[in-house]
Amino acid sequence: EAQVTQNPRYLITVTGKKLTVTCSQNMNHEYMSWYRQDPGLGLRQIYYSMNVEVTDKGDVPEGYKVSRKEKRNFPLILESPSPNQTSLYFCASSNLGGRADEQFFGPGTRLTVL
Amino acid sequence: QKEVEQDPGPLSVPEGAIVSLNCTYSNSAFQYFMWYRQYSRKGPELLMYTYSSGNKEDGRFTAQVDKSSKYISLFIRDSQPSDSATYLCAINQAGTALIFGKGTTLSVSS
């Protein structure tokens, strides 16, 4: 089954404790992206990747890191999480030769930073 | 002015009603327009995709783009309780990112 998977689905952590949210897709997509979704603010892009070893900042990259060492994986790293990073996070991928139109989204990771 | 504006609702309609969801955008250079549907506790999924002005129909759903007014719409005919979800308009920005509206929450009652 074609899908984007994220782990963990739910995470409660404390300020400053480094964490990684994994994202994996099995569709051989070139384009991958991370979003956060907050009430009243909608979906905002954090980082995206056009291909292996190619990443770039989205609209809200502060406090986040990403890497793209393999085509299928695009982990999101929070080196020192803070309460304002409490949010619902989505990973997405696209198969349109690096374009961002038809994105397939993962199920989401709900992160709470205390 | 924000790049994409969408009325958040919520919008409540009875089963069988025609629903109209709308977004406005500010940059006339945008060419690719999408509607995503997001059920509660799920990720968004692509519902409709249009390029340039005009209408596109898929079953009970019609996407409409009016580039002269910078206005995009999604119409749902014969709405069903299963259509209850949040609908997000999205616009492609320079081929590398989507700009999403904040979403309109729709509830269809039986």
Image (cartoon, coloured by chain):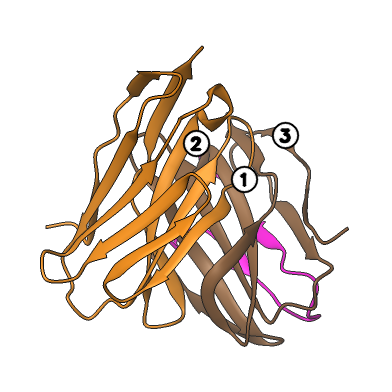
Residue drawn at (59%, 85%), measured in percent from left and top?
A98
Q: Quadrant of residue B64?
A: bottom left
Residues at circles 1 and 3 in contact by the CB criterion of under 8 Å: no
Chain under disc 3: A
Q: Do the residues at pointers 3 and 2 share their chain?
A: yes
Q: Residue at x 34, y 34 (%)?
A: B19
Judging by the rendered image, the residue that carries numbered circle 3 is A10
Image quarter hosting the N terminus of chain B: bottom left
| Chain label for disc 1 | B
Amino acid on which the number 1 mark rests in the picture: Gly
B18, A78: nearer the viewer: B18
Identify the mark at residue B43; answer none if there is no mark. 1
Magenta segment: A60-84
Q: Colour of chain A?
A: brown
Residue A92 x, y percent position in the rendering: 63, 61
For disc 1, the neighbor class at 10 Å (few under 14, some 14 to 19, many from 20) is many
Report helix, strand or loop for mark 3: strand
> Which amino acid is tagged 2?
Pro
Tally the marks.
3
Q: Judging from the image, what is the letter of the chain drawn in orange?
A: B
Q: Are marks 3 and 2 in contact (CB under 8 Å)?
A: no
Of badges 1 and 2, the one in the foreground is 1
A70 in the magenta segment: yes
Q: Position of residue A54 (x, y in %)?
A: 62, 87
Q: Residue at x 80, y 73 (%)?
A: A72
Q: Which residue is mark 2?
A: A83
Q: State which tag comes first along the sequence, 3 or 2.
A: 3
